[in-house]
Image (cartoon, helix red, strand yellow):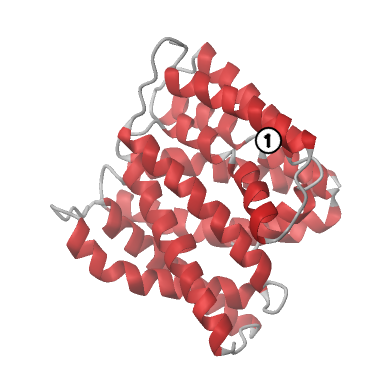
Amino acid sequence: MLRAYTWLTFCVVVWGSNFVFGKLLVQAFSPTLLTTLRLLFIVLFLVGLSSYKKHVKRVNKADLLTIVSLGIIGVFINQWSFFVGLQTADPTTSALILATTPILTSFLAAVFLKEKLTLRMLTGSFVAIIGIYFVVTKGSLSSVHMDKGLIWIVITMITFAIMIIITRVLSQRIDPMTITLYSNITGFIVSIPFAFLLDTPLRISFEMSDWALLISTAVVVHGIVTLIWNHNIRHVDASKASILSNLEPFVAMVMGLILLYKPITGVELLGALFIVGGVVLSTYQRKKQYKQAISSK
Protein backbone atom coordinates (compact mmCIF):
# COMPACT_ATOMS: atom_id res chain seq x y z
CA MET A 1 0.00 0.00 0.00
CA LEU A 2 2.81 2.43 0.91
CA ARG A 3 4.59 1.61 -2.34
CA ALA A 4 1.41 2.31 -4.34
CA TYR A 5 0.90 5.69 -2.65
CA THR A 6 4.55 6.54 -3.28
CA TRP A 7 4.14 5.90 -7.01
CA LEU A 8 0.85 7.84 -7.12
CA THR A 9 2.50 10.78 -5.39
CA PHE A 10 5.29 10.61 -7.95
CA CYS A 11 2.66 10.84 -10.73
CA VAL A 12 1.09 13.92 -9.14
CA VAL A 13 4.50 15.58 -8.84
CA VAL A 14 5.22 14.95 -12.54
CA TRP A 15 1.79 16.21 -13.65
CA GLY A 16 2.08 19.30 -11.47
CA SER A 17 5.57 20.00 -12.79
CA ASN A 18 4.28 19.88 -16.37
CA PHE A 19 2.97 23.45 -16.04
CA VAL A 20 6.45 24.76 -15.30
CA PHE A 21 8.06 22.56 -17.97
CA GLY A 22 5.50 23.85 -20.47
CA LYS A 23 6.41 27.42 -19.53
CA LEU A 24 10.07 26.64 -20.25
CA LEU A 25 9.28 24.92 -23.56
CA VAL A 26 7.21 27.79 -25.02
CA GLN A 27 10.27 30.00 -24.61
CA ALA A 28 12.20 27.68 -26.95
CA PHE A 29 9.51 26.58 -29.44
CA SER A 30 6.54 28.37 -30.98
CA PRO A 31 3.31 26.97 -29.43
CA THR A 32 1.76 25.16 -32.40
CA LEU A 33 5.05 23.62 -33.49
CA LEU A 34 5.59 22.55 -29.88
CA THR A 35 2.15 20.92 -29.91
CA THR A 36 2.95 19.07 -33.15
CA LEU A 37 6.33 17.83 -31.94
CA ARG A 38 4.93 16.79 -28.57
CA LEU A 39 2.11 14.84 -30.20
CA LEU A 40 4.59 13.21 -32.58
CA PHE A 41 6.56 11.70 -29.71
CA ILE A 42 3.39 10.77 -27.82
CA VAL A 43 2.09 8.93 -30.90
CA LEU A 44 5.42 7.14 -31.42
CA PHE A 45 5.30 5.97 -27.81
CA LEU A 46 1.67 4.84 -28.08
CA VAL A 47 2.27 3.02 -31.37
CA GLY A 48 5.20 1.15 -29.86
CA LEU A 49 3.21 0.31 -26.75
CA SER A 50 0.11 -0.81 -28.66
CA SER A 51 2.23 -2.95 -31.00
CA TYR A 52 3.77 -4.64 -27.97
CA LYS A 53 0.47 -5.23 -26.16
CA LYS A 54 -1.66 -5.68 -29.30
CA HIS A 55 -4.68 -4.02 -27.70
CA VAL A 56 -5.73 -1.72 -30.55
CA LYS A 57 -8.87 -2.77 -32.38
CA ARG A 58 -10.87 -1.54 -35.34
CA VAL A 59 -13.82 0.77 -34.73
CA ASN A 60 -16.97 1.40 -36.75
CA LYS A 61 -17.47 4.58 -38.79
CA ALA A 62 -19.75 6.28 -36.27
CA ASP A 63 -17.30 5.78 -33.41
CA LEU A 64 -14.39 6.73 -35.64
CA LEU A 65 -16.06 10.09 -36.36
CA THR A 66 -16.46 10.65 -32.62
CA ILE A 67 -12.80 9.76 -32.04
CA VAL A 68 -11.77 12.23 -34.75
CA SER A 69 -13.79 14.93 -32.96
CA LEU A 70 -12.07 13.92 -29.73
CA GLY A 71 -8.67 14.18 -31.43
CA ILE A 72 -9.40 17.68 -32.71
CA ILE A 73 -11.01 19.12 -29.57
CA GLY A 74 -9.61 17.06 -26.72
CA VAL A 75 -6.10 16.56 -28.06
CA PHE A 76 -5.04 19.22 -30.57
CA ILE A 77 -6.99 22.26 -29.33
CA ASN A 78 -6.46 21.20 -25.72
CA GLN A 79 -2.67 21.01 -25.98
CA TRP A 80 -2.32 23.94 -28.38
CA SER A 81 -4.34 26.31 -26.18
CA PHE A 82 -2.31 25.12 -23.18
CA PHE A 83 0.98 26.19 -24.77
CA VAL A 84 -0.46 29.39 -26.25
CA GLY A 85 -1.73 30.31 -22.81
CA LEU A 86 1.56 29.56 -21.07
CA GLN A 87 3.33 32.14 -23.25
CA THR A 88 1.99 34.84 -20.91
CA ALA A 89 0.02 33.05 -18.18
CA ASP A 90 1.54 32.18 -14.84
CA PRO A 91 1.97 28.38 -14.51
CA THR A 92 0.64 28.31 -10.94
CA THR A 93 -2.51 30.24 -11.87
CA SER A 94 -2.92 27.97 -14.89
CA ALA A 95 -2.71 24.89 -12.67
CA LEU A 96 -5.33 26.32 -10.34
CA ILE A 97 -7.74 27.05 -13.20
CA LEU A 98 -7.28 23.57 -14.67
CA ALA A 99 -7.91 22.11 -11.22
CA THR A 100 -11.57 23.12 -11.65
CA THR A 101 -12.00 20.76 -14.62
CA PRO A 102 -13.95 18.17 -12.55
CA ILE A 103 -16.57 20.80 -11.72
CA LEU A 104 -17.19 21.71 -15.37
CA THR A 105 -17.18 18.01 -16.20
CA SER A 106 -19.97 17.47 -13.67
CA PHE A 107 -22.07 20.21 -15.27
CA LEU A 108 -21.49 18.80 -18.76
CA ALA A 109 -22.33 15.31 -17.53
CA ALA A 110 -25.58 16.65 -16.11
CA VAL A 111 -26.50 18.21 -19.47
CA PHE A 112 -25.35 15.51 -21.89
CA LEU A 113 -25.27 12.33 -19.79
CA LYS A 114 -28.28 13.18 -17.61
CA GLU A 115 -26.30 12.82 -14.40
CA LYS A 116 -27.82 14.46 -11.32
CA LEU A 117 -26.66 17.84 -10.04
CA THR A 118 -26.35 17.93 -6.26
CA LEU A 119 -26.36 20.72 -3.70
CA ARG A 120 -22.87 19.61 -2.68
CA MET A 121 -21.63 20.11 -6.25
CA LEU A 122 -23.21 23.58 -6.54
CA THR A 123 -21.76 24.64 -3.18
CA GLY A 124 -18.31 23.35 -4.11
CA SER A 125 -18.48 25.18 -7.43
CA PHE A 126 -19.23 28.45 -5.65
CA VAL A 127 -16.29 27.93 -3.26
CA ALA A 128 -13.95 27.17 -6.18
CA ILE A 129 -15.10 30.29 -8.07
CA ILE A 130 -14.21 32.38 -5.01
CA GLY A 131 -10.74 30.86 -5.13
CA ILE A 132 -10.35 31.62 -8.84
CA TYR A 133 -11.40 35.22 -8.19
CA PHE A 134 -8.71 35.58 -5.52
CA VAL A 135 -6.04 34.15 -7.84
CA VAL A 136 -7.00 36.12 -10.96
CA THR A 137 -7.36 39.45 -9.14
CA LYS A 138 -4.20 38.74 -7.10
CA GLY A 139 -5.99 39.96 -3.98
CA SER A 140 -7.12 43.27 -5.46
CA LEU A 141 -10.86 42.82 -5.13
CA SER A 142 -11.65 46.20 -6.66
CA SER A 143 -10.42 45.28 -10.14
CA VAL A 144 -10.30 42.20 -12.33
CA HIS A 145 -7.43 41.90 -14.83
CA MET A 146 -7.69 38.78 -16.99
CA ASP A 147 -4.40 37.99 -18.68
CA LYS A 148 -4.88 36.96 -22.32
CA GLY A 149 -2.98 33.77 -21.61
CA LEU A 150 -5.44 32.81 -18.89
CA ILE A 151 -8.29 32.98 -21.41
CA TRP A 152 -6.49 30.29 -23.42
CA ILE A 153 -6.00 28.26 -20.23
CA VAL A 154 -9.75 28.46 -19.63
CA ILE A 155 -10.22 27.10 -23.17
CA THR A 156 -7.78 24.31 -22.23
CA MET A 157 -9.94 23.52 -19.20
CA ILE A 158 -13.13 23.48 -21.27
CA THR A 159 -11.67 21.19 -23.95
CA PHE A 160 -10.30 18.93 -21.21
CA ALA A 161 -13.78 18.59 -19.71
CA ILE A 162 -15.24 17.87 -23.17
CA MET A 163 -12.55 15.25 -23.70
CA ILE A 164 -13.53 13.50 -20.45
CA ILE A 165 -17.20 13.41 -21.43
CA ILE A 166 -16.51 12.05 -24.94
CA THR A 167 -14.05 9.50 -23.53
CA ARG A 168 -16.59 8.40 -20.94
CA VAL A 169 -19.13 7.71 -23.70
CA LEU A 170 -16.66 5.96 -26.02
CA SER A 171 -15.14 3.81 -23.25
CA GLN A 172 -18.44 1.97 -22.90
CA ARG A 173 -17.78 0.40 -26.31
CA ILE A 174 -14.05 0.81 -27.03
CA ASP A 175 -10.97 0.03 -24.93
CA PRO A 176 -8.97 3.06 -23.67
CA MET A 177 -5.80 2.21 -25.61
CA THR A 178 -7.66 2.33 -28.94
CA ILE A 179 -9.32 5.63 -28.04
CA THR A 180 -6.05 7.18 -26.87
CA LEU A 181 -4.01 6.07 -29.87
CA TYR A 182 -6.53 7.07 -32.56
CA SER A 183 -7.36 10.42 -30.96
CA ASN A 184 -3.68 11.35 -30.57
CA ILE A 185 -2.93 10.35 -34.18
CA THR A 186 -5.82 12.59 -35.27
CA GLY A 187 -4.57 15.47 -33.13
CA PHE A 188 -1.06 15.10 -34.54
CA ILE A 189 -2.20 15.05 -38.20
CA VAL A 190 -4.48 18.05 -37.70
CA SER A 191 -1.73 20.03 -35.96
CA ILE A 192 0.80 19.78 -38.82
CA PRO A 193 -0.62 22.44 -41.20
CA PHE A 194 -1.51 24.75 -38.31
CA ALA A 195 2.12 24.83 -37.19
CA PHE A 196 2.90 26.78 -40.37
CA LEU A 197 -0.33 28.80 -40.44
CA LEU A 198 -0.53 29.96 -36.81
CA ASP A 199 3.10 30.33 -35.75
CA THR A 200 4.52 33.61 -37.03
CA PRO A 201 7.41 33.45 -36.74
CA LEU A 202 8.04 29.72 -36.51
CA ARG A 203 10.45 29.20 -33.62
CA ILE A 204 12.47 26.03 -33.09
CA SER A 205 15.30 25.43 -30.66
CA PHE A 206 18.52 23.73 -31.66
CA GLU A 207 19.60 23.16 -28.07
CA MET A 208 19.80 19.49 -27.08
CA SER A 209 18.53 20.32 -23.58
CA ASP A 210 15.31 21.79 -25.01
CA TRP A 211 14.70 18.74 -27.18
CA ALA A 212 15.45 16.42 -24.28
CA LEU A 213 12.89 18.28 -22.15
CA LEU A 214 10.31 18.17 -24.97
CA ILE A 215 10.71 14.44 -25.65
CA SER A 216 10.92 13.41 -22.02
CA THR A 217 7.86 15.40 -20.95
CA ALA A 218 5.85 14.09 -23.91
CA VAL A 219 6.70 10.44 -23.26
CA VAL A 220 6.89 10.57 -19.47
CA VAL A 221 3.94 12.87 -18.67
CA HIS A 222 1.45 11.47 -21.20
CA GLY A 223 2.79 7.95 -21.44
CA ILE A 224 4.81 6.35 -18.68
CA VAL A 225 3.30 8.27 -15.76
CA THR A 226 -0.24 7.52 -16.93
CA LEU A 227 0.62 3.82 -17.06
CA ILE A 228 2.13 3.99 -13.56
CA TRP A 229 -1.03 5.72 -12.26
CA ASN A 230 -3.35 3.19 -13.88
CA HIS A 231 -1.33 0.29 -12.48
CA ASN A 232 -1.09 1.53 -8.90
CA ILE A 233 -4.58 2.99 -8.53
CA ARG A 234 -5.88 -0.60 -8.44
CA HIS A 235 -4.21 -1.11 -5.06
CA VAL A 236 -5.59 1.94 -3.22
CA ASP A 237 -8.93 3.57 -2.54
CA ALA A 238 -9.96 5.57 -5.61
CA SER A 239 -11.28 8.51 -3.58
CA LYS A 240 -7.97 8.88 -1.72
CA ALA A 241 -6.06 8.72 -5.00
CA SER A 242 -8.29 11.48 -6.38
CA ILE A 243 -7.48 13.71 -3.42
CA LEU A 244 -3.78 13.20 -4.24
CA SER A 245 -4.39 14.45 -7.78
CA ASN A 246 -5.80 17.70 -6.36
CA LEU A 247 -2.32 18.51 -5.05
CA GLU A 248 -1.10 19.35 -8.57
CA PRO A 249 -1.51 23.15 -8.15
CA PHE A 250 0.64 23.08 -5.02
CA VAL A 251 3.30 21.09 -6.91
CA ALA A 252 3.18 23.73 -9.65
CA MET A 253 3.76 26.42 -7.00
CA VAL A 254 6.80 24.66 -5.58
CA MET A 255 8.29 23.85 -9.00
CA GLY A 256 7.71 27.43 -10.11
CA LEU A 257 9.66 28.59 -7.06
CA ILE A 258 12.52 26.15 -7.77
CA LEU A 259 12.83 26.43 -11.56
CA LEU A 260 11.40 29.88 -12.35
CA TYR A 261 12.33 31.61 -9.07
CA LYS A 262 8.70 32.70 -8.72
CA PRO A 263 7.77 33.41 -5.10
CA ILE A 264 4.63 31.84 -3.63
CA THR A 265 2.22 34.53 -2.48
CA GLY A 266 -0.33 34.37 0.30
CA VAL A 267 -3.10 35.16 -2.20
CA GLU A 268 -2.13 32.15 -4.33
CA LEU A 269 -2.17 29.87 -1.30
CA LEU A 270 -5.56 31.19 -0.18
CA GLY A 271 -6.99 30.86 -3.68
CA ALA A 272 -5.55 27.36 -4.00
CA LEU A 273 -7.19 26.28 -0.74
CA PHE A 274 -10.57 27.58 -1.90
CA ILE A 275 -10.24 25.98 -5.34
CA VAL A 276 -9.02 22.59 -4.17
CA GLY A 277 -11.53 22.60 -1.31
CA GLY A 278 -14.34 23.44 -3.72
CA VAL A 279 -13.29 20.71 -6.15
CA VAL A 280 -13.07 18.10 -3.38
CA LEU A 281 -16.48 19.15 -2.04
CA SER A 282 -18.24 19.24 -5.41
CA THR A 283 -16.78 15.99 -6.77
CA TYR A 284 -16.96 13.94 -3.58
CA GLN A 285 -19.47 11.55 -5.11
CA ARG A 286 -17.97 11.62 -8.58
CA LYS A 287 -14.28 11.00 -8.01
CA LYS A 288 -14.19 7.39 -9.08
CA GLN A 289 -15.94 8.11 -12.38
CA TYR A 290 -13.74 11.12 -13.05
CA LYS A 291 -10.49 9.28 -12.42
CA GLN A 292 -11.53 6.38 -14.64
CA ALA A 293 -12.21 8.84 -17.45
CA ILE A 294 -9.02 10.85 -16.99
CA SER A 295 -6.88 7.72 -16.84
CA SER A 296 -7.71 7.00 -20.49
CA LYS A 297 -6.22 10.33 -21.61
- The residue tagged 1 is 279
Against 46, residue 139 (above or below) is above
Residue 81 percent across, percent down from the top left: 37, 50
Is residue 44 visible in this depiction of the protein?
no
Residue sitting nearer the eye, 84 or 215: 84
Image mark count: 1
Give the image location of residue 42, x and y in percent.
46, 66
Residue at 70 percent of width and 79 percent of height: 173
Horizontal side of 193 relative to 285 (left or right) equals: left
Q: Position of residue 291 (x, y in %)?
A: 71, 53
Task: Residue 222 in the image: state x and y as whole percent.
Answer: 53, 59
Q: Please tell me whether residue 177 is drawn above or below residue 224 in the rendered image.
A: below
The three-letter code of the residue at mark 1 reads Val
66 and 54: which one is in front? 66
Does residue 234 appear in this view?
yes
> What is the secondary structure assignment of the residue under circle 1?
helix
Query: Image point 65% across, 28% down: which residue?
Result: 126
The outermost residue toward the left is 201
Does residue 255 sit above or below 239 in this rendering? above
Q: Is residue 92 left or right of residue 101?
A: left
Q: Which residue is drawn at the image coordinates 39% and 19% (left, top)?
A: 144
260 horizontally vs 95: left or right: left
Quarter of the image for the C terminus: give it.
Answer: bottom right
The part of the image, by quadrant, that contains residue 15 is: top right
